[in-house]
Amino acid sequence: MGVVYYKQNKNILEPHLSWDEMRLVYVSFNDRQETLTPTAVHCHEKNLELQYICGGRGNLRIGNRLYEVQEGDLLVYNQGELHDESADPEEGLWFYNCGVTGMNLPGRPEGELIAPETSPRIHAGETAGVVESLFKLLYAEVERDLPKNEQITHDILRVLISMILYQLPKERQLPPREKDRLLIACKDYIDSHFMEELTVEKLAERSHMSISGFAHQFKKIFGFPPIQYIIRRRIGEAQRLLFTTDLSITEVSVRVGYDNISYFNNQFKRFAGMSPQNYRKSKVGAHQFKKLNKLLLHHPI
């Protein structure tokens, strides 16, 4: 072993990049058992999220694209970016994730860490061990809850984000095909109006397509038939509300577009494998918070 001397490069960091407002909102670890309960389409309106896959396989939909992920992949969900998660039913998924607020890069919207033309899936490659260690340190430091905890977690987070910005390899994404733009616009409409009564007929009309042609092309691009996607969008929002608010089950049902609480319960159970009430207990019960999440109680998403 020899001494390796560090050669300072003054041009590595941009001098106008400020870290003062950046804050860790939550950090969690999810094992195979927990990720077998799927998470439907949702977004984080007040923070961006970083996710590191440390085991297993799965499919993640981010925006309008589907990504296959495995160990060593790092995912960046910009603030407000719709996404859902499905673990491989045989292998499952193990991952760390954390939420971050106050990310303000020059010339970009608040909470945007990855530019729209850049893939949000980053293959960590040779740096995978370092990235995983940073997530582990972040989780362990929050769990210890010792003095100066906030400063230390801030420093760890700064290192992680600096690696994402300046060191980890990124891939450019091809823009959507021109012929898909109407369908993407239709999906965007669903994402904004999912709580309303939507029919395939009306959506096909918006896309200037026949009903059968629209349904076929929508599934081909987005992976689900239109009605199934609407249900996933509703259930995903319900999961978010159950996890991050104290709204009653009835209030959650109404907010996501179900006036019939019994029908809502059935749809939720069909997707998540448990009732809305049991889902809430599994996510926000004392044991779950103790095991998974150390900051969310004080910093709700």
Image (tube, rainbow, N blue to C red):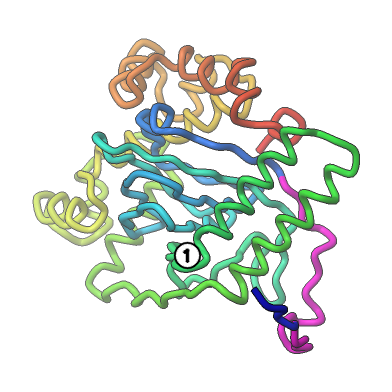
- The overriding secondary structure of the stretch rendered in magenta is loop
Residue at far right of view: 147
Where is residue 293, by image quadrant?
A: top right
Whether residue 207 is situated above or below residue 256 in the rendered picture: below
Neighbour tally class for label 1: few under 14, some 14-19, many 20 plus, Cα within 10 Å: many
- Could you say where residue 245 lies in the image, as x and y percent from the top left? 63, 26
Left of 147 or right of it: where is 135?
Answer: left
Q: Position of residue 223 (x, y in %)?
A: 23, 50
| Residue 176 position (above or below residue 26) | below
Classify residue 121 by image quadrant. Answer: bottom left
Q: From the top left corner, tell me how far across and down residue 70 is, in percent.
A: 35, 52
User: Circle 1 sits on which residue?
Assistant: 124
Please tell me in which quadrant of the rendered image residue 241 appears.
top right
Picture residue at 81% right of the left edge, 50% below the top: 152
112 lies above or below 1? above
**Magenta span includes 14:** yes
Report the magenta residues as a range.
Answer: 6-24
**Apparent side of residue 165 relative to residue 294 in the rendered image (left or right):** left
Identify the residue at image location x=20%, y=61%.
Answer: 208
Furthest residue to the front? 1
**Image quadrant where one finds the N terminus:** bottom right
Q: Residue at x 53, y 58 (%)?
A: 129
